[in-house]
Image (tube, rainbow, N blue to C red):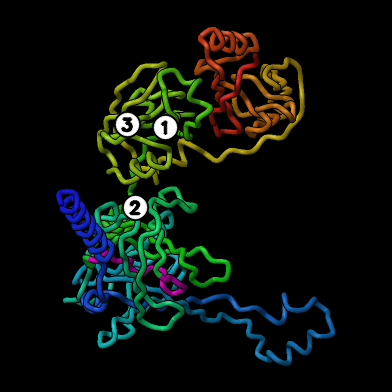
Amino acid sequence: MLMGLLSLLALSFALVLAQASMTTAQERPATFADLAEQISPAVVNITTSTTIAGRTGPQGLVPEGSPFEDFFNDLDPDGRGGPQRSSALGSGFVISEDGYIVTNNHVIEGADEILIEFFPGGEPGVPAELIGTDPNTDIAVLKVDLDGLPFVEFGDSNGPGSRVGDWVMAMGNPLGQGFSVSAGIVSARNRALSGTYDDYIQTDAAINRGNSGGPLFNLDGDVIGVNTAILSPNGGSIGIGFAMSSAVVTNVVDQLIEFGETRRGWLGVRIQDVTPDMVDAIEGLEIARGALVTDVPAGPAEDAGMLSGDVVLIFDGIEIEDTRELVRIVGNSPVGKEVPVSVLRDGDMQELTVVLGRRETSEAVAFPASTEPEDEAEPSQILGLTLSEITPELTDQFSLSIEDGLVITAIDPDSEGASKGLLEGDVITEAGQQAINTVAELEEQIAAASDAGRKSILLLVRRGGDPRFVALVLEE
């Protein structure tokens, strides 16, 4: 009897759990209609017109002097060589009742005329003024001369409604078909495509050409992303779309509205990711994380006492996982802000305070464009590398721009250095995070690393003006 009662209780408990689990699984809207109706009036279609130079005659279609040249000229008696108009379509959304509109830079880039079409029933063909653009994040801000407009607000792209698996809704003007709504889920977060400040939300909500610049909403009706790109072999949606996260966009939009341009914080260093094979060569580091400083020119970081070889682990109270995260956080920080930075140096943590500069005005001066070296060879073989101290002949041969270090004049193609991309003409300026100028100094550092029980040594290698660290395994 007791056993039967216990079995019954267990069955009831299991049913309750199953029911709770089903309820959780079904926590999705029965319809998106109410949400679409609420926020649609703030979404706009964007039409741009651009003047492009026309071609004169059939150039590019048939070879000059071809017997077909007259045929094409007959088809084009006017020459059609004058300027012609090209139009493009995109999407956007209103973020204030006085008419500020957000879209993609590539939607309006180079446009002579920008016209805004509001949701059916609203104003058609309203001219828009370009307030500012940021090609780095592909964001642009427009302004129309209207008041009392319905608008939407930005939400938290790192918040609860933006988790992987959460429902989202995209709106825009796909393929010029007019206002359209599509729904899906957040497929992934923190995606990087090719930009320095990339922080994309990936979604399977249908996004096509014409959706560019349109909003990606969470279920609260807040914009958590700006639809920007798709991954597709045929140009149409296959369920892999990308929206630049509101965490990036909000700061850019605020700056474009206030200044007409971006004003990003600048630390003033070259950095690279810490790879697993470097961990053993960096004293005090236990896992591959942080941003490894490869170069510190005159600027904010140098003023704060940062050195090449430092590993930035904490910036403004945030633990740094990799270089992409550090670049994004620094770029989102205000110019002139005093920021505490924790770096690992020679096995000890160092606390620095950096006053951030402005990237747009300082970076090109601190890091001028460098030229690539050529190649050739010379004596003293270490770790599969043939090395030589710098001489005037080698400086000319490899177009060297520095005077200190050891030049790689040849590489064993089967060596680890070759597999890690080292080239003839590269210059090794540090070994074991110590400056070197002679082969003897390199050998000393290799011996010191070996005596300390390290399995690899960290080399700072410069190519042109660009430095990077490479860890090479010590020979047994």
Please give the name of the residue rendered at 15% of the width and 52% of the height, measured from the top-left corner.
1
Between disc 3 and disc 2, the foreground one is: 3
Q: Position of residue 436 (x, y in %)?
A: 57, 15
* Tag 3 residue: 314
Chain-order first, disc 1 or disc 3: 1
Q: Is residue 149 visible?
A: yes
Check if residue 209 falls in the magenta segment: yes
Residue located at (29% from left, 42% from top): 335
Direction from residue 181 to residue 97 in the image, left or right: left
Residue in the image at 70% along x and 22% along y = 385
Residue 289 circle label: 1
Residue indicated by mark 2: 262
Kind of residue sitting beneath label 2: Thr
Residue type beneath disc 1: Arg
Residue at point 67%, 80% (across, down): 56
Q: Provide the secondary structure element on which disc 2 rests.
A: loop
Q: Is residue 40 left or right of residue 426?
A: left
Q: Position of residue 124 (x, y in %)?
A: 31, 86
